[in-house]
Amino acid sequence: MCRFRREFQEKFHWVLVHQMSCALHNSNTTVGKICGYPEIKKVISNNARVVSFFSRSHYWGGQLNEVAKKAGITRSLQTHSDTRWYTLIKQAMSVKEYHYALNQICLRDDAQKKTNGFSPVNADVVRIVCWEKDQWDLNEQLIRYAKPLVDMIGNLESRDASLADVMIELLKCARTLQKMPTYDTDNLHFLQHTRTEFDKGFHLMNTDLAFFALFLHPLCRKLALKQKRNSRTMR
């Protein structure tokens, strides 16, 4: 990315590249930092373990697909990319959607002990699915907190997205996180961690140029002037 920006700037010197950071890259990095919270790292590892087992096991993967189909689940369990942090959230969403089907499979007798020559589901997978309640509470919390950023990345992937669109999406995320409801099962320290990491990413992208683009948007001038953080004086 840095090399591309440098070479692009050398060839198209009139484009203001050096004053802008990549919104998609920064948003993806913010998701990665949010996922770096210690308890959440365990949740992500457990999600990957469950997906890995059922994806690699021909028999149990087939059994899971049959139960999922009867439950009306149409998409498959999602894998993730090591560099695209937002795919961790998509994986978490798919595991959440499969929770019922996973429970139905892992509570079966033949899933917990060898039967008719078929190996059971691995004990650690059964434990994650059936007995670790914190896993599912934190997984739900991770999805609620990080999905606004994932949606933002999806909305900005279009080639038609402008710098003003970036600011609009950022402000939408900020408003969503600010008004995010909390529940008895929520980890409030993780909520604070999420808001802190988002604020860092917000200020990194909320440059003078981005603010000016928002100000020039015909529908967002008042919104630009109402920004309380990093407020600026227009002269």
Image (spheres, helix red, strand yellow):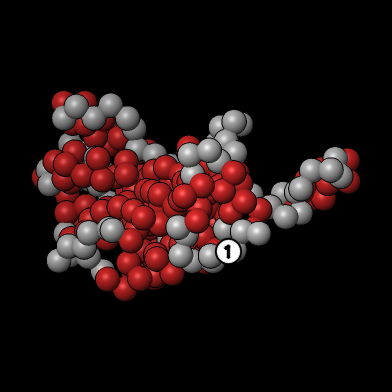
Is 74 drawn above or below residue 211 in the view shown? above
Say which amino acid is labelled 1: Arg
Outermost residue, front direction? Answer: 235
Viewed as shown, does residue 60 lie left or right of 169? left
- The percent position of residue 18, horizontal first and vertical second, equals 76, 54
- Mark 1 sits on what residue? 232
User: Residue 209: x percent and y percent?
Assistant: 66, 53
Viewer-proximal residue, 162 or 46?
A: 162
> From the viewer's perspective, is 81 left or right of 119?
right
Q: Residue at x 48, y 39 (%)?
A: 219
Q: Is residue 26 visible?
A: yes
Could you tell me which residue is drawn at 28 percent across and 58 percent down?
A: 179
Above or below, 212 against 12 in this view is: below
Which residue: 59% across, 63% down?
233
Camera-side residue of 52 and 17: 17
Mark 1 packing: few (<14 Cα in 10 Å), some, or many (20+)? some
Residue farthest to the bottom, as pictured: 189
Say which quarter of the image contains residue 115. top left
In the picture shown, does residue 97 fall above or below 68? below
Q: Residue drawn at (76%, 48%), measured in percent from left and top?
A: 16
Task: Give above or below for 198 relative to 224.
Answer: below
Estimate the x, y position of residue 3 in percent, counting from the top left: 79, 50
- The answer to whether 192 appears left or right of 204 in the picture is left
Residue 140 picture location, percent across and down = 26, 53
Secondary structure beneath dot 1 equals loop
Q: Which is more toward the observer, 45 or 143?
A: 143
